[in-house]
Amino acid sequence: MNEVEITKELMLSEQRLASVRDFHPDNQLGYDHAADFARRAKSECERLEAARVKITKPMREALQAVQDTFVPPIKNYAAMLALLKGRMMECQKVMLAKHDAAVLDAQQAYRQGDMQQLAVATQAITTSEVVAPQGVSTRVTWGDFEIVDSSQIPAQFWMINQAAIRLAIVQAKGQIVIPGVRVIKNEVVALRS
């Protein structure tokens, strides 16, 4: 079926629809005509649907084949991204721990008057600072939690409505106390392309 044929089908269907709009059967003959029109309309719907499927089925199959081709590498890159974000968060925690230890060392060296150790600790502070590369940042997300004492949870969160708890935590940006619930702060890496 080509575009000209589809245009003809459209015009014919519009004319037939208009005539049916004006058709109001009120006797057996009219009822029989309405049944005939309905059967023809159903037959036309089925014929046109079959023609549409004949045209679109290969297109859908081709589209699905193309999409299926892209799925494995997309999944691989998504897995790679998840692993790298996790490793970056681990690295950031290690670097922050080194930085905090260097600050404590510097404070102790200062209290003891050990200028040589203070210089070493100060250098360690500088080299252990976490500097995010261009296009990388961290953001805090709220929404994870664990039930620590279900007997203390307010009635609005009974049957333990985890979605309601998560929503309350997200809306309060983690600054909420829900008896029986421990709010968990998560930091995730955000990347700009």
Image (cartoon, grey):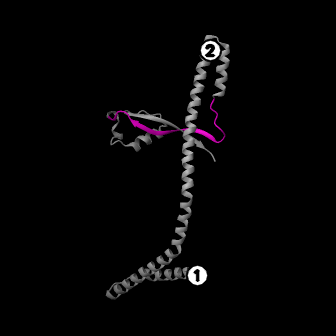
Question: Which part of the image, by quadrant, shows the N terminus?
Answer: bottom right
Tell me the element at label 1.
Answer: helix
Q: Position of residue 10 (x, y in %)?
A: 52, 79
Q: Position of residue 32 (x, y in %)?
A: 34, 86
Q: Earlier in the sequence, mark 1 or mark 2?
A: 1
User: Could you tell me the amino acid type at mark 2?
Assistant: Ala
As drawn, the label of residue 109 is: 2
In-front residue for pair 36/150: 150
Report the residue at 56% width, 38% height from top. 87
When the figure is inspected, residue 107 is found, relative to residue 82, above or below; the finding is: above
Q: Which numbered mark, 1 or 2, is in the foreground of this view?
A: 2
Q: Position of residue 60 (x, y in %)?
A: 52, 68
Q: CA distance from mark 1 to mark 2?
A: 89 Å
Report the residue at 58% width, 29% height from top. 96
Tell me the element at label 2.
Answer: helix
User: Could you tell me the amino acid type at mark 1?
Assistant: Val
In-front residue for pair 56/120: 120
As drawn, the label of residue 4 is: 1
In-front residue for pair 179/54: 54
Q: Quadrant of residue 135?
A: top right
Magenta range:
129-150
Verify CB contact (< 8 Å) between mark 1 and mark 2: no
Q: Position of residue 109 (x, y in %)?
A: 62, 14
